[in-house]
Amino acid sequence: MTSQSTLSSVPALGTHPASGSHPSRAETREQLAKASYDLLVIGGGILGISTAWHAAQSGLRVALVDAGDFAGATSSASSKLLHGGLRYLQTGAVKLVAENHFERRAVSRQVAPHLANPLTFYLPVYKGGPHGAAKLGAGVFAYSALSAFGDGVGHLLSPARAAQDVPELRTENLRAVAVYGDDQMNDARMALMTVRAAVEAGAVVLNHAEVGGLRFTRGRVTGADLRDRIDGVEFGVNARLVLNATGPWVDHLRRMEDAHAAPSIRLSKGAHLVLRRTAPWKAALATPIDKYRITFALPWEDMLLLGTTDEVYEGDPADVAVTEKDTAQILDEASLSVRDEQVRRELITYSFAGLRVLPGGPGDTAKAKRETVVTEGPGGMLSVAGGKWTTFRHIGRTVMQKLERLPGHPLGDDFEPVSSLPKRLPLPGVANPRAVAHRLLVDNPAPGPRMAADTARHLATHYGSLAFDIVRLANENPDLARRMHPDAPEIWAQVVWARDHEWAETQDDVLRRRLTLTVRGLATDEIRAGVQNLLDQRH
């Protein structure tokens, strides 16, 4: 692969939608407006996506819409972890940790091994820190036991040994290092693959479609009026049941059903920073800040992810952003265990903030459990919010079980109960990513430079076996085989794939969520123009 990033390398011809691409927005709108659905899911975060996936698997006619992009808010602003929740052991929530581990292992081993990867965590114990070595040693042993030791046995490690794997680890006053295992992912990619799974099961989906109002029949909510934010076209969707899965906006939609609806949730802001790495990291750091909070330093996408904050947020969810205070706090907390060289501000390539949805009520947000809140309005609309990424499949199944048991059976009885569905249905592209990367490197029939190793790894771990379809695009048009930027693994064929097969409508849809150039700080004006050029060739 070449390393050009000029506009001359952006293909201008032969990139119109290929056979097998999803329907156009106009075709999807027509389909949504003409049919009558069993279930309309409003909200394309992972909770709504997972519910739509399971509902479609059950044989229901499902529609899914979102005012922005799929996973465009909270669901692509997480710490990128599939984890059991080590901190929950502090509160004695042993059963919860065991359940989280079960879901984590199911996702990382059977459902999406191509999108998740194991990650070793080092928990440093410093002199004067909030926890002693004996306590943390016992904690990580119990944590690994609740995972049936599937990631090895939690244990203590010497500071010298830990510093070999994490050269930027601060070793002054470091007494010991506790070791445990969890998993990591690219949250936006996991969400998009789940959207694809829902569509393959029969769901009809549309992003950038904003709800302007709800439809009522004899006092019951039976659909929604929508506006396409891409071209302004207005349309409607009729459904027997409407599910409000709008995350931080859940109460906004509830007030469309009942103007006097009381608040059901509260919001907590979590901010993160992405930095260029100054050295290789073979493990992540989870550093205790106090009795309940941990700050993470995670190797992710060849960079370093730092965070997170946890504070009450009471503003407009659309305005959530990383502030100077957030940046200073994250760097300051990271510096407890990370050397100064690695936490310099000039290394920051990107920052992002998301909102955790927590049950309403008093108390410290840092101590709150990530529970799922379910409420039913006077018009029969079910609203669901909260939970955590690790248990996204479990939440989808749980919501479906609630829908099945609703009084009056608004969904009818002509569908498969979720309890009878396969327990570990894989996401599209499921494959061994190492095997896929190997194949990409050795099976490259196109003339010219061979595929770069980092591109092969990137394609394998973000698309699984679907990577072969992307490479076919590149083989058909050599311009699409070019790297988008010398310092990123992505190739231009991924933009065409995002446009034709992953519902990408805007530059940010492509560069922030389908690809990683934005978080790497590489989404230049030139690259944005190239992406827009390819998006404009859609029609």
Image (cartoon, helix red, strand yellow):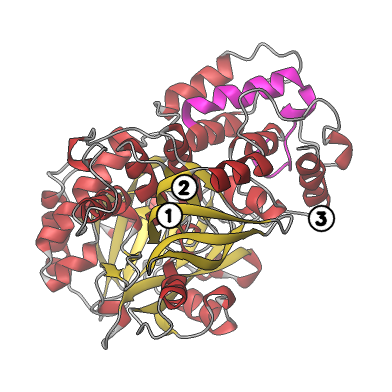
- Magenta segment's dominant SS is helix
User: What residue is at 69 percent from the left and 32 percent from the top?
Assistant: 493
- The answer to whether marks 1 and 2 mark residues whose Cβ atoms lie closer than 8 Å is yes
Q: Amino acid at mark 2?
A: Ala
Is 506 one of the magenta-colored residues?
Answer: no
Tag of residue 525 = 3
Residue 293 vs 478, above or below: the answer is: below
Residue numbers of the magenta segment: 464-491
Left or right: 487 in relation to 424: right
> Which label's residue is closer to the chain start, 1 or 3?
1
Residue 163 quadrant: bottom left
Q: Which residue is mark 1?
A: 41
- Residue placed furthest toward the right: 8
The vertical placement of 21 against 353, above or below, is above
Front disc: 1 or 3 = 1
The amino acid pointed to by label 1 is: Val
